[in-house]
């Protein structure tokens, strides 16, 4: 018969987060490293494809070109996300304290609304049978 030798045994368990949670945390960390603020970050999987959506906060004085460059840089900047083929949708939101103003008169806005309505009414009607 074998002799039982007293011993101290330590079991260390590492909690594992679901893969989507790791991806979201990785995206948050990447945006923080790049000095970019994001919110409303979400991910879902459908038919084996991952869809990621987030809102990128940019300085209100940036040009659209520069804001788009930042969004593109963020979309490419996460090495962990590269292992997850994903479709990424980034909403660019200008953040600031100023309220946008327009020099367009109410009459011009009404004329624009009418032009849009006329255009939409010329589009072919589609019907879907359920």
Image: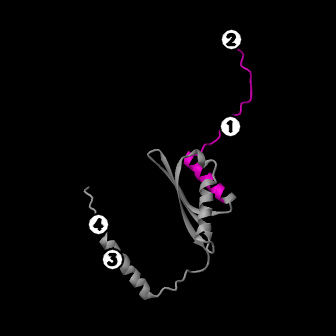
* N-term mark: 3 or 2: 2
* N-term mark: 1 or 4: 1
- Callout 4–callout 3 Cβ contact below 8 Å: no
For disc 1, the marked residue is 12
* N-term mark: 1 or 3: 1
Q: Nearer the viewer, mark 1 or mark 3?
A: 3
Give the percent coordinates (x, y) of residue 129: 25, 57
- Callout 2–callout 1 Cβ contact below 8 Å: no
Does residue 18 show up? Answer: no
For disc 2, the marked residue is 1
Give the percent coordinates (x, y) of residue 76: 61, 54
Q: Give the CA distance from mark 4 to mark 3.
A: 12 Å
- Mark 2 surroundings: few (<14), some (14-19) or many (≥20) residues within 10 A: few
Q: Give the CA distance from mark 1 to mark 4.
A: 65 Å
Helix, strand, or loop for circle 4? Answer: loop
Residues shaded magenta: 2-31
Residue at 62 percent of width and 47 percent of height = 80
Residue at 65 percent of width and 38 percent of height = 13
Q: Quadrant of the C terminus?
A: bottom left
- In the picture, the disc for residue 75 is none
Q: Nearer the viewer, mark 3 or mark 2?
A: 3
Q: Give the CA distance from mark 2 to mark 1.
A: 31 Å
For disc 3, the marked residue is 118
For disc 4, the marked residue is 124
Helix, strand, or loop for circle 1? Answer: loop
Would you place residue 4 above or below residue 66 in this image? above
């Amino acid at each position: 018969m074998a002799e039982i030798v007293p011993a101290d045994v330590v079991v260390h368990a590492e909690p594992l987060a679901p893969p989507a949670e790791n991806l979201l945390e990785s995206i948050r960390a990447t945006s923080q490293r790049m000095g970019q603020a994001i919110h409303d970050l979400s991910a879902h999987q459908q038919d084996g494809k991952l869809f990621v959506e987030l809102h990128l906060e940019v300085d209100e004085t940036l040009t659209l070109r520069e804001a788009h460059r930042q969004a593109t840089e963020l979309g490419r900047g996460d090495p962990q996300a590269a292992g997850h083929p994903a479709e990424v949708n980034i909403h660019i939101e200008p953040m600031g304290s100023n309220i946008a103003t327009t020099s367009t008169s109410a009459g011009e806005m009404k004329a624009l609304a009418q032009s849009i309505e006329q255009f939409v009414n010329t589009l072919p009607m589609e019907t879907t049978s359920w």
